[in-house]
Image: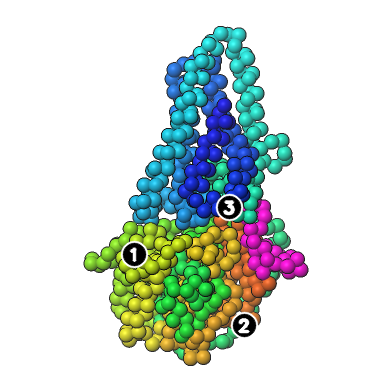
Amino acid sequence: MLLAFWIFLFDFQRLIFILANPDVFEKFPDWLGVFVYSLRLDIATAAFMSTLPMILFSIICIFPKSFLKWIFFGVVLLEVLISCAIHSGEIIVYVEWKHKLTSKVFLHLFHGAEVVRTADNLSIGWFVILLILEFFSGFIVFWYVFIQPIRLMEFLKKKWDTLLTITTSICLIGISFLFARGGWQQIPINIDSAYYSEDFKLNDISINSTYFFANSYLLYLKSDLEDLVPTIDTKEANEISKSLYNKHHQDTTSVLLSDKPNVVLIILEGWSANAMGYMHHTIGATPNFDRLVKNGLLFSNIYATNTTSEIGHTSILAGFPALPETAISSYPEKHRKLNTLNESLKKAGYHSGYLFGGDLSYGNIEGFIKEHHMDEVWDEDDFPSGYDHGKLSYHDEAVYAVFLSRINKSSNPFFRVVFTGSTHAPYDHPSTSAQNWTGKEADYMNSMIYADQCLADFMRKAKEQSWYKNTLFVIVSDHSHSCPTHEVPYTVDFFKIPLLFYGEVLKETYRGKIIDKIGSQADLAATLLTQLKIGSKEYPFSKNLIDPSTPDFAFLATVRGYGFTSPLGKFIYHFDAKRYHQQTYSPQHFPQAKKWSDALFKGYYEFFKNLEFQ
């Protein structure tokens, strides 16, 4: 009866998810499969959740005390509440994340204020409504299925019933454990048992949300990353990695008129190359950036290393590539051993500063920046009065205004970094002119229009300053984002982001030029430092994108997986599904690409693991 109750609740939750995502109905009859292929994992989850209540139920059969019945009721209803909260939260975040609720949520929950500020009132309201709907429905079924039956069990008071009850309970608990592991097979059931479609949303609906989240929580408590690292020989992996990063070759190509220009690094929150006219065929959202490209040096094949801001920061500033399920900024004992751009530039006489219009505590970004000796760090608490604050951070126009005033107080040479925020949910920018995008991801696209206008305004005002002519502007995104043409993070192209060098300090022959070498944001460190005649050997996993001899490739970490791309193809592998979401290499070229990605994955992990001992 307990198993049937849980399976009913899980299918009811699926129905709610489908109703909240009506585009699923367009996939008829495929979407009906979610109620079939989900059954095995649902039974396993139901068995897990029934074990403790079943033990309590057995005790009640022998000792039908009133307080025991209330404990039983409380345990089951608490489990129902937790399951409904997980699923309701998943429906809300799916709009933004485009994947199921994972351990990533704990990073947000540790900063409760950031959660409240990121979520709009409508999202919070919908979460409460969905939670009440799911819990109340489960409670009604629970009332009629369990309250009366427990009252009927009071006849089991006789001594001769005790042995029978204990025997039956042991058998049922044993069967429950068997169901929980999915059967007698050698390897226990996993989420891949619910995969049945090429459509990722259908698979996400099919996978039991409670099981998935519990599995993520266990991974959060004890990461299984080491078990997922390829088994390639460490020596071979290091040799391949060294050849790919080409550190022995010192290219002398210079694209700058000055060896010691000021550097302004603009980190754009969640700008996807797929939402930008000059980078993709999505025309209209970023006309101002597109105009900058015509006079700048564009790197057109750059990929984010992951999907979150704190990982993007460590890749941009420290040249460290991402590992699945891992944010190195959360490991002070490790990230302290890394070098950062501001530290390398400080040795060359640069003064550094970093500005963000919100709270930097998320993902320990503030700790990472400050522990790496950024000379000045400013966040929302340092803004002067008179500027409008959004729910998450100050709007981009205010951020750029304060940033410009800070730069004007700087002494040459300087390295100044700004991190924007208006293209992050809840997209509450003040512009009324940036409201003309409709359809999929309209809120995000309209925020891009606004942010692009703010960037143009900043560049126009910067051009009027005395320091402008000797300043290199580096514009890069911290990670990508869902957009009308790329909605889910299950293809390599989803991770594509902009990287642009701009300014009068660029040589005339490089203005308007495009470098299509494949790389990631982690390659910015070596590329920039080489142009400034500063060595990049302290950044072993960052390559010079301007060097023609540098191999074309990018490694990226995804949700429970990783990806790799080179001129011959691209792939993304999922650990739990044990399959490739995308694989475009030919049979001839795939083995080499797989060996390269295995070597990089192994090299990154071994480096990460041993950092605190260096």
Foreground label between 3 and 2:
3
Q: Position of residue 308 (x, y in %)?
A: 48, 60
Secondary structure under the numbered disc 2 in the rendered image: loop
- The residue to which callout 3 is attached is 27
Q: Position of residue 167 (x, y in %)?
A: 64, 18
Tell me which numbered mark, 3 or 2, is placed earlier along the sequence: 3
Spot the residue most to the right. Answer: 588
Residue 479 vs residue 343, the one in the foreground: 479
Q: CA distance from mark 3 to mark 2?
A: 46 Å
Tell me which numbered mark, 1 or 2, is placed earlier along the sequence: 1
Q: Residue at x 38, y 87 (%)?
A: 469
- The residue to which callout 2 is attached is 548
Instruction: Check the image and report above or below for 181 versus 532.
Output: above
Amino acid, disc 3: Lys
Asked if residue 566 is among those painted magenta in the image, a careful observer would answer no
Residue 64 vs residue 320, the one in the foreground: 64
Tell me which numbered mark, 1 or 3, is placed earlier along the sequence: 3
Query: What is the span of residues highlighted in magenta in the rendered image?
Result: 569-598
Q: CA distance from mark 1 to mark 2?
A: 41 Å
Q: Position of residue 603 (x, y in %)?
A: 63, 64
- The residue to which callout 1 is attached is 429
Secondary structure under the numbered disc 1 in the rendered image: loop
Amino acid, disc 2: Pro
Foreground label between 1 and 2:
1
